[in-house]
Image: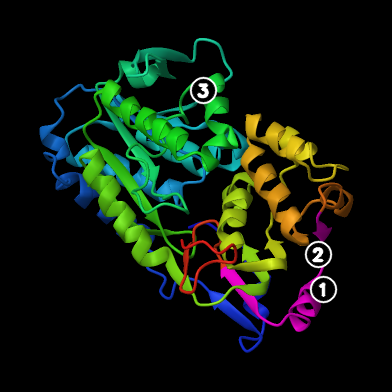
Amino acid sequence: MTTTHQSATCALDSSQVIHVRPEHDRSLSAEAIHDAFRAALAKPLDYPPLASATVPGDHVVLTLQYGTPCPLELVEGALAALRDAGIESSNATLLLSHGFSQEPEFLQEKGKIAQLAASEEIEIVVHDPAKENTTSIVGVTKAGQPLRLNRMLGDADLVLSIGVCSPAPDTDGPCDTFAGLFPVFSDQETIDHYRAPIAADSKVIRSQRQNEINESGWLLGIGLTVQVVPSPSDGIAAVLAGEPRMVAKRASDEYRRIWSQQVDTPGDLVIATLTGDASQQTWENVGRALETAKHVLEPGGALVLSTDLAELPGPSLGRLAGMENSPEVERELMRDRFADSWAALGLSRALARGPVYFRSQLRPEIVESLGMTPLKTEEELLRLVSTSKRCIALEGAQRLLLSVVAGDANGDDL
């Protein structure tokens, strides 16, 4: 299992802080993940068993996105499920998203997944969206746009996509039908297109992108997907497989049972914590935490982002360095297409509402250049808590789905 970030809020006196977190941790053990994966593919939702959907000699491509909890256990479960279906591991390729290139402990000769691949004789490929000829056109969307995906996906007899259910924080809809497939395994231009934060403010654009994500799977002819539901301890609560729309709905229902929480009144201090290992300590998840926290923060209140983030700011966050918040800066951020664009837009808006404190592994001068106040010690955090009237701590803020009983801090119902 992965090692999770231990939040500073765990040490805070519960009488001082209102802790908002899932009540129960439903994490599966490593053995239970294997069993759940095999059972899910033996009896998929609204789909024939995997053994009935393949023939001897079929080449299978397994896809796995960086940031998926328990990657090693999932790959082991997937290979066991393939063996159950009569598919030799040597006929499978494990296609990892580009983020895994930053995790050599998984891929180097003595790494966990590399060792597993060697013992199972399975090929490992890390997708490189910037490399020429990595992708090919698999079809044309209803909007007339060519859809590009890794060449291996178009050549495979069976694509087994393993995605992580992660519903948008401000919608009641299901998670992506083909979560972890598109645009993750597309070309760099397409990935950058999806990074533009404009979709966060436009239901029309968000709907268009959802349709494109759905089309990616249908154009590949994918009738079977796997989605996992993350647990509070950075593990896995459930593994579901079957017809993509059915899986997305069931996974979303389970996700909401675990991660949905209510808050009765906003606070003048909100501590939003990123939980999880290094793969969860990203600017993208900072953006999700900002989106979650804004709903329970009083106007003018202080926000604390408690992370283990070591990732340097990208070009979009660089726009905030030494600049006052202005409509022009926001317009530029809305058009940006970088990995940190959504986080930069969320941070710009948060700074316009009140002070933001940041706990991370970044140097204090970097944090200060972005308009935030660095927090170095737990004592500094405790001093902030002692001066607040109502402090709310959000554990796993990047995954929480919040509703405010009396309406959120901006006057809107969630």
Secondary structure of the residue carrying numbered label 3: helix
Q: Is residue 37 visible?
A: no
Q: Choose mark 2 or mark 3, whichever is in front.
A: 3
Per the image, the residue denoted by label 1 is 380
Q: In the image, which residues are magenta?
A: 372-394
Q: Is residue 126 visible?
A: yes
Q: Is residue 372 left or right of residue 206?
A: right
Label ID, residue 190: 3
**Residue lying at 57% horizontally and 52% vertically, measured from the top left:** 288
Give the answer, above or below, for where 249 lies relative to 96. below
Residue 22 picture quarter: bottom left
Q: Is residue 91 left or right of residue 44?
A: right
Residue type highlighted by circle 3: Thr
Would you say residue 373 sits in the magenta stretch?
Answer: yes
The x, y position of residue 134, in whole percent, is: 49, 15
Badges 2 and 3: C-beta atoms under 8 Å apart?
A: no
| Count of residue discs | 3
**Residue lying at 64% horizontally and 74% vertically, measured from the top left:** 267
Residue type highlighted by circle 2: Leu
Measure how far apart labels 3 and 1 are at the Cα level: 42 Å
Q: Is residue 250 left or right of residue 289?
A: left
The x, y position of residue 44, in whole percent, is: 17, 45
The x, y position of residue 412, in whole percent, is: 51, 61
Badges 1 and 2: C-beta atoms under 8 Å apart?
A: yes
Residue type highlighted by circle 1: Glu
Q: Is residue 320 left or right of residue 262?
A: right
Give the answer, above or below, for where 85 lies relative to 133. below
Per the image, the residue denoted by label 2 is 375
**Residue lying at 45% horizontally and 37% vertically, measured from the top left:** 206
Query: In this view of the protein, which residue sits in the foreground, 143 or 73?
Result: 143
Query: In this view of the protein, which residue sits in the foreground, 143 or 396?
Result: 143
Would you say residue 273 sits in the magenta stretch?
Answer: no
